[in-house]
Image (spheres, rainbow, N blue to C red):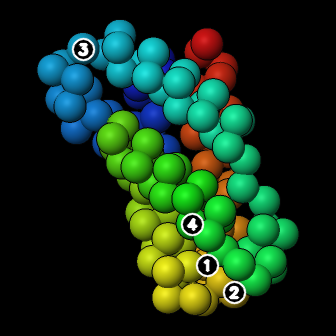
């Protein structure tokens, strides 16, 4: 089983993601590496949801939402879409709950990608 098969098993819409890159699966795999780098460079922690002013947190979570959406990393995209919406509605407690739910899935996807780097 290769990277794309494993990602697909984790809920990533690999077919849609590669379609966005004109069917270039090698480029898609390379972009997955870029996604991991972005996630490592833009870490989000649960403590950030307790801060009060969520301006920076909204920017970070919106960036993750966009990157995961562009690559059709559906479980991450769906969760961060909800997180961004809740933060914009000034509901950081609920956003934190969604964040904590997606963390294990997010870690699993990132570990899968890193395994093939």
Rounded to the nearest angstrom, the CA distance separating label 4 from label 2 is: 14 Å
**Pair 2/3: label in front:** 2
Q: Residues within 10 Å of mark 3 (few under 14, many from 20)?
A: few
Instruction: Tell me the quarter of the picture where residue 28 sits.
Output: top left
Q: Between tags 3 and 4, which lies in front?
A: 4
Identify which residue is drawn at 61% across, 49% down.
Answer: 106
Comparing labels 4 and 2, the label whose residue is closer to the camera:
4
What residue sits right under mark 3 in the picture? 24
Mark 3 or 4, nearer chain start: 3
Q: Residue drawn at (55%, 59%), measured in percent from left and top? A: 59
Point out which mark residue 58 bears: 4
Q: Which mark is residue 14?
A: none
Q: Quadrant of residue 33?
A: top right
Q: CA distance from mark 1 to mark 3?
A: 35 Å
Q: Earlier in the sequence, mark 4 or mark 2?
A: 4
Instruction: Name the residue rendered at 50%, 50% in the picture.
Output: 63
Marks 4/1 in contact by CB < 8 Å: the verdict is no
Q: Position of residue 113 (x, y in %)?
A: 58, 26
User: Which quarter shows the C terminus?
Assistant: top right
- Mark 3 vs mark 4, CA separation in Å: 32 Å
107 to the left or right of 48: left
Q: Secondary structure at mark 2?
A: helix
Q: Report the side of 14 relative to 42 (left or right).
A: left
How far apart are labels 4 and 1 at the CA level? 10 Å
Cβ atoms at labels 1 and 2 below 8 Å apart: yes
Which mark is in front, 1 or 3? 1
For disc 1, the marked residue is: 95
Please, what secondary structure does the residue beneath circle 4 have?
Answer: helix
Mark toward the start of the polypeptide (2 vs 3): 3
């Amino acid at each position: 089983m290769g990277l794309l098969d494993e990602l697909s098993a984790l809920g990533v819409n690999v077919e849609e993601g590669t379609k966005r890159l004109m069917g270039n699966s090698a480029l898609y795999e390379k972009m997955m590496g870029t996604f991991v780098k972005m996630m490592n460079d833009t870490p989000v922690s649960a403590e950030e949801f307790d801060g009060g002013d969520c301006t920076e947190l909204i920017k970070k979570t919106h960036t993750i939402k966009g990157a995961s959406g562009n690559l059709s990393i559906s479980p991450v995209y769906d969760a961060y879409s909800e997180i961004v919406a809740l933060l914009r509605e000034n509901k950081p407690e609920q956003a934190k709950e969604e964040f904590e739910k997606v963390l294990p899935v997010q870690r699993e996807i990132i570990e899968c990608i890193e395994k093939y780097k």
